[in-house]
Amino acid sequence: MSDLLMSDAPALALLAVFAVGLLAWLVAFALAVLALVHGLVRAYRWLRPRPRWVVDELALAEPDSVLWRSCHSTRCGHMQTRHTVTPEGVAICQGCGASAVSA
């Protein structure tokens, strides 16, 4: 019986080394995928437009001279932005400075 176990020892050792190596490659592959996804998410967040005035100057109560509407300039890209309404009735975008007639 001991001769049978001794003849299988090299094959079992080779199988164990292969299994450990395969596990190491799978862990390395999973970590590489996670790093790639993390980098892509950070790149996408960096590319998103976030005007500083949207974050810094949001007031709890909007005055009557502030209007939220879509800006038709290429800089703001038709997004809802804050517009200040002048006494003449012209809405000025606070993001890019484009003017539009107030509705």
Image (tube, grey):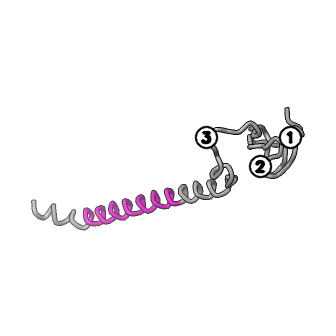
Name which of mark 1 and mark 2 comes first in the sequence.
1
Q: Give the range drawn in magenta.
A: 11-35
Residue 94 circle label: 2
Name which of mark 2 and mark 3 comes first in the sequence.
3
Image x and y of residue 71, in percent: 81, 43
Whether 5 is among the magenta residues is no
Query: What amino acid does circle 2 point to?
Result: Gln
The residue beneath circle 1 is 87
Q: What element carries label 3?
A: loop
Query: What amino acid does circle 1 point to?
Result: Pro
Q: What element carries label 1?
A: loop
Choose top left, top right, bottom left or bottom right for residue 83.
top right
Choose top left, top right, bottom left or bottom right for residue 85.
top right
Q: How crowded is mark 3: few (under 14 residues within 10 Å), some or many (20 or more)?
A: few
Whether 29 is among the magenta residues is yes
Q: Is mark 2 on a helix, strand or loop?
A: loop
Residue 60 circle label: 3
Residue at point 64% right, 46% down?
Answer: 58
Residue at point 89% right, 40% down?
Answer: 88
Residue at point 84% right, 42% down?
Answer: 86
In the rendered view, tell whether residue 9 sits above or below residue 89.
below
Residue at point 64% right, 38% down?
Answer: 61
Name which of mark 3 and mark 1 comes first in the sequence.
3
In the rendered view, tell whether residue 12 sits above or below residue 64.
below
Does residue 8 appear left or right of residue 59 in this picture? Answer: left
How far apart in space, not on screen, are marks 1 and 2 (Cα)?
A: 16 Å
Image x and y of residue 33, in percent: 51, 57
How far apart in space, not on screen, are marks 3 and 1 (Cα)?
A: 23 Å
